[in-house]
Amino acid sequence: MKSLLFAQLVACMVTAFLFGQATDGNLVGTITDVTGAAVPGAVVRITNRGTNVETTATAAADGGYRFNNIPVGRYDLSVIKPGFTVVKESGVTVELNKTATVNVSIQVGAVSQTIDIVAAAAAIDTTTAQVQTSFTAQQAKDLPATSLTAGILNLSLLSAGVASSGAVGYGTGPSVGGQRPTNNSFNIEGVDNNRKDVTGPVVYVSNEAVSEFSVLQNQFSPEFGHSSGGQFNTVIKSGTNAIHGSIYEYLQNRNLNAIDQLFQNQGLKTNPRFDNNRLGATAGGPIVKNKLFIYGNFEYNPQGLNSTPAGGVNAPTAAGYAALAGTPGVSRTNLAVLKQYLPAAAVGTDTTTVNKAVIPIGPIPIVSPNFLNNYDAVISSDYYISERDQLRGRYVDNRTRGIDNNSTLPAFYTPRTIDSHLASLAEFHTFAPNLTNELRLSYSRFNQPVDAGNFKYPGLDAFPNILIENDLNLQLGPDPNGPQSTILNTYQWTENVNWTKGQHTFKFGYDGRKLIAPQSFVQRSRGDYNYLNLEEFLLDRAPGDLGERSVGLSPYSGNQIVSYLYANDSWRIRPNLTLTGGVRYEYTTVPFGEQLQRLNSAASVPGLISFQAPQAQKTNFAPRLGLAYSPGKSGKTSVRVGFGMAYDQL
């Protein structure tokens, strides 16, 4: 472990100018005159409409210019060259993880003359083989799909090549390019937002706080990794020079929905309870105009539902319980527990047999409480220290409070809590117009305990999980998944650089992550006892279906270290032809808990079988190659082809 930490330290020192996962976008183009000849030395200036921050670049010998790591948003672009008229294009859009192309033609004339292009044409990516779809803040708020559970992640289903997994395959999210959902990667402005245990995001960002959302589907450059499926990236809104805010509510409830015909056939005139309000507020603006900005969002989402067990539950009637009390051979302990938690059925509709006694049973109504309250907060700050330096801070907080109703009977319900947080700080520095650097530090935490309550079963140290299958269809006991706990702490350090040299744009990167993940879960730690019928349970026979209990609740440590290295060259062979090539290297240590498998070596038989700890893979090199061609000089069409390789995630 010491040698690994030393290797990581050396890697961080060597990669002081390395490029990491994109958190912004790029803007490129070619400056030409009316004859199509390149105009070198032209000054290209872009101005962010929201913050009024200006950035300049100079066209190279071939007329090409490039802006790297530009915050997403809308910009006004102007081109200035002595002896030529000034050309201004308004409303150029820079999208997340995308390289937009804006070619500009200028004509001979006085600098005092200006040609204004009021509405800039849609800028497309003509320089990479990357396939992606981006969604704006307006789409995140207004499209109906975002009102569902997964929020903005549902927007990805509107992309070609992205489909619902149909509950097939392990993992969270859609299937991208036919791959399993476990191969998806979730990020917030390039910061790792992946749950290492069951996949999916650690935190969610409310729709109102989303500035832009993108999904990379295929042929992305080696700066993107961790997974070969969809790369989901969310950008959080920033403050601007204008003070702005909003108050909003999404409302769904039983009174707005038509009554299902199935309910009407049963004589019901109202819908079961379903009340889902999502209400919140936002505020943003400048602390120091043109320099320091802040934005905040708070959202409260209470959900009230009804819970009813599937298939219905039967119970003995009052007469049935009385008959059981006088039936010989019945376990008084088991019968007392059953009567304590399972109320008698009002009407007997069927019978079951216990030690030759006929016991009337019937359905019992279970309409149990079920609520879930979500509290979500987002804070973002942006500080433009100078033309060369800027700081970006982000914080996302999710808290869930509700009822754990995974047990059948409401008497066994327990409180449900989930807490998750993500914080990041990024520093961007411009060494020269063609050399930029980013240092990013982040931390995320996920904490979800599953409590089995403090229920007592006489003679046992824990209340078991009991199933009485064929006649009662009853699960008796607390949440079958409890007790367990999951804590995931992820520390991330990324050092980035983007260097443009002539017709080449080089990217190199290091991304290091430290995961501290103490967890506790052992299957059947309280004991699982599946009885075929009530008779087996009350006569205290061995369960006819299943009877198992594990020994104790032992902790598991998912602690591990992850190191990613990558390099890429984007070679602009011609203004309309770009070749990209790179390689990514991934090294992931074996989780500490799995390393304990080395203790099994005591069971090894020389020459026959040997047991040892799993070994980390050390040769995970993933090459990437892409070609982008834009016919003509308009920059309105792009033809892409590429090859990529990736490694599966555990």
Image: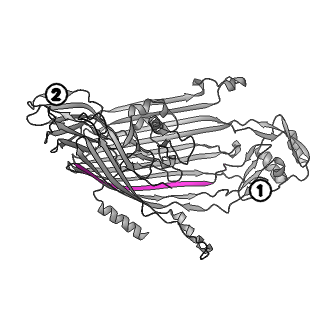
Give the tally of numbered discs: 2
Return the mark for residue 458: 1
Side (left or right) of 311 relative to 189: right
| Circle 1: residue type | Pro
Classify mark 1: residues with Cα within 10 Å, few (<14), some (14-19) or many (20+): few
Q: Nearer the viewer, residue 622 or 650?
A: 622
**Precedes in sequence: disc 2 or disc 1:** 2
Q: Tell me the colour scheme of the image.
A: one colour
Dot 2: what SS? strand
Side (left or right) of 2 relative to 314: left
Q: Nearer the viewer, residue 296 or 257?
A: 257
Task: Please say whether residue 393 is visible from this viewpoint.
Answer: yes
| 612 in relation to 289, above or below | below
| 439 in relation to 360, above or below | below
* Among the 4 quarters of the image, the one containing residue 252: top right
Return the mark for residue 639: none
Side (left or right) of 551 relative to 179: right
Q: Is residue 344 magenta?
A: no
Q: Which residues are magenta?
A: 478-507
Residue topped by disc 2 = 115
Per the picture, the main secondary structure of the magenta-coloured stretch is strand
Image x and y of residue 464, in percent: 72, 54
